[in-house]
Amino acid sequence: MNKLTDCFTLSNGVKIPCVGYGTWKSSIEDAKNGVIKAIEVGYRHIDTAAAYENESGVGAGIRESGIKREDLFVTTKHWITERGYDKTLRAVDESLKQLGLDYVDLYLVHWPCVECRNPNWKAVNADTWRGFEQAFRDGKIRALGLSNFEKKHVDALMQTAQIAPVVNQIEFHPGYTQMENVRFSQQAGMLVEAWSPLGSGAVLNDPFLNEMARRYNWSVAQLCIRFALQHDVLPLPKSVTPARIAQNAQVFDFTISPEDMKAMDEMPLLGFSTYRPEEAPADALYD
Ligand code: A2P
């Protein structure tokens, strides 16, 4: 990858620009302004979610940027309150309405329904996925994927899926890489995307990463974004700050050495943001 417009190719042939602009925790207004800035500095891939409650801002930013729809890759995500076939179809339409778009490039199941919360979890996920497949056939989505799925959830889904997921978006940053899940997902034909590639900011003050970043004459944020790319993981850095949005796009003229990649891989737990799906607290996931 040499520039923001270089693409990974998903296993269904759809091309996806190699760094996405993340919008988790952005307000509607910040999402709008951030998307305009991101497109101005060259990002062609925007990631949002129904649960972020900023899809309308993302859509407004896209329109104000003046970019042609076909030159942009837009991802949104299905929320846990909308599980099941009929609700999923309605959720797709609602997201398209909020975004002001006719289709999204990628639609993700935001979190799996999990065994510890619902003994019927397999059927619930299967039913939701049938809704995804229908919306895909209806031309509202170009690629279907998952988020926060582990092997157990993917294996169960594949028992009934007619269309295979092509993406798994998971938490990934130095200090929490879930390498086992990365490898499994890649072997299962999914591109892995990194949410919180900067650990939601929690890794940026780490002394070890700061020392390494100084050696490369880069910021820790750039180092983290590059770290994901060198693992063939697609980073989705979030920022509402124009200078940082621009800085996070400058990650193509240096390479982290194999020794430093190994050292980053082996860092102790740092910046782990929430929980694994099967360990969700009672107020986090419900069915
Ligand atoms: P802000 O949005 O206020 O600019 P992640 O992508 O892992 O979720 O991390 C997002 C967090 O990291 C946000 O708090 C964001 O701040 C901050 N951030 C993003 N890019 C940079 C950067 N280049 N330097 C410092 N902080 C950054």
Image (tube, grey):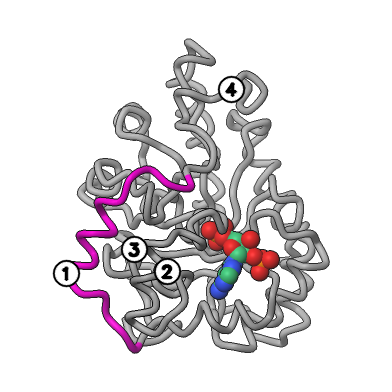
Apparent side of residue 235 relative to residue 22 in the rendered image (left or right): left
Q: Residues within 10 Å of mark 1 (few under 14, many from 20)?
A: few
Residue at 23%, 48% in the rendered image:
183
Residue 205 can be seen in this image? yes
Q: Quadrant of residue 69?
A: bottom right
How far apart, in angstroms, are the residues tagged by discs 2 and 3? 33 Å
Which numbered tag is attached to residue 281? 4
Quarter of the image with the C terminus in it: top right
Q: Which residue is mark 2?
A: 210
Q: Is mark 3 within 8 Å of ligand 1?
A: no
How far apart, in angstroms, are the residues tagged by discs 1 and 4? 38 Å
Residue at 51%, 52% in the rendered image:
136
- Taking the image in four quarters, ligand 1 sits in the one at bottom right
Q: Which residue is mark 1?
A: 258
Q: Position of residue 264 (x, y in %)?
A: 29, 59
Describe the element under mark 4 as helix, strand or loop.
loop
How far apart, in angstroms, are the residues tagged by discs 1 and 3? 26 Å
- In this rendering, is residue 262 above or below 109? below
Q: What's the residue type where badge 1 is placed?
A: Pro
Residue at 31%, 52% in the rendered image:
190
Which numbered tag is attached to residue 43? none
**Along the line of sight, the residue nearer the viewer: 108 or 240:** 240
- In this rendering, is residue 28 above or below 69? above
Quarter of the image with the N terminus in it: bottom left
Residue 75 can be seen in this image? no
**Along the line of sight, the residue nearer the viewer: 255 or 163:** 255
Q: Position of residue 272 (x, y in %)?
A: 47, 43
How far apart, in angstroms, are the residues tagged by discs 1 and 2? 18 Å
Region in magenta:
253-271
Q: Which residue is mark 3?
A: 10
